[in-house]
């Protein structure tokens, strides 16, 4: 696992306790199935953008704009343990 491994593990821990089901996460060339049970949704984004979201740097609108198969609203609020910014941070 690359330098984003800690945030991926953090999301895994969050999903284990959230009761939302499993989420397939693709960040560039890497992908993971995180959370318990069957995959309920999938999300894909370039590595930098996904790392930003997992690290609490993506707004709801930015996360919802990722390539989703499933309901982004179900998972967007738990992608990071950090508070979601209300306004874009202009890092893209």
Image (cartoon, grey):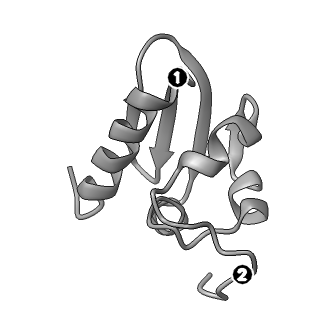
**Residue 32 in view, yes or no:** yes
Describe residue 79's horizontal placement relative to residue 75 as left or right.
left
Label 2 environment density (alpha carbons within 10 Å; few <14, some 14–19, many ≥20): some
Helix, strand, or loop for circle 2? loop
Q: 46 or 21: nearer the eye? A: 21
Helix, strand, or loop for circle 1? loop
Label 1 environment density (alpha carbons within 10 Å; few <14, some 14–19, many ≥20): few
**Picture layout, residue 11 above or below residue 32:** below
Viewer-nearest of labels 1 and 2? Answer: 1
Q: Position of residue 83 (x, y in %)?
A: 56, 67
Describe residue 42's horizontal placement relative to residue 6 as left or right.
right
**Do labels 1 and 2 touch, CB within 8 Å?**
no
Describe residue 38's horizontal placement relative to residue 84 as left or right.
left
Q: Which mark is residue 83?
A: none
**Picture layout, residue 55 above or below residue 11:** below
Q: Position of residue 46 (x, y in %)?
A: 54, 60
Q: Residue at x 73, y 41 (%)?
A: 72
**Residue 34 in view, yes or no:** no
Q: Quadrant of the C terminus?
A: bottom right
Task: Tell me how far mark 1 sits from mark 2, CA to CA.
Answer: 29 Å
Q: Residue at x 46, y 54 (%)?
A: 28
Q: Residue furthest top?
A: 38
Q: Position of residue 73 (x, y in %)?
A: 75, 41
Q: Residue at x 34, y 56 (%)?
A: 7
Mark 1 vs 2, N-terminal side: 1
**Picture layout, residue 14 above or below residue 66:** above
Residue position marked by numbered label 2 in the rendering: 88
Q: Residue at x 69, y 52 (%)?
A: 66
Number of dots carrying numbers: 2
Q: Position of residue 18 (x, y in %)?
A: 50, 30
Residue position marked by numbered label 1 in the rendering: 19
């Amino acid at each position: 696992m690359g330098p984003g491994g800690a945030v991926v593990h953090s999301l895994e821990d969050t999903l284990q306790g959230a009761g939302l089901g499993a989420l397939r996460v693709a960040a560039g060339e890497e992908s993971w199935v995180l959370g318990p049970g069957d995959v309920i949704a999938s999300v894909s984004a370039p590595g930098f953008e996904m790392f930003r979201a997992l690290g609490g740097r993506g707004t709801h609108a930015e996360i919802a704009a990722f390539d989703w198969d499933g309901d982004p609203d179900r998972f967007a609020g738990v992608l990071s343990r950090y508070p979601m910014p209300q306004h874009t941070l202009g890092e893209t």
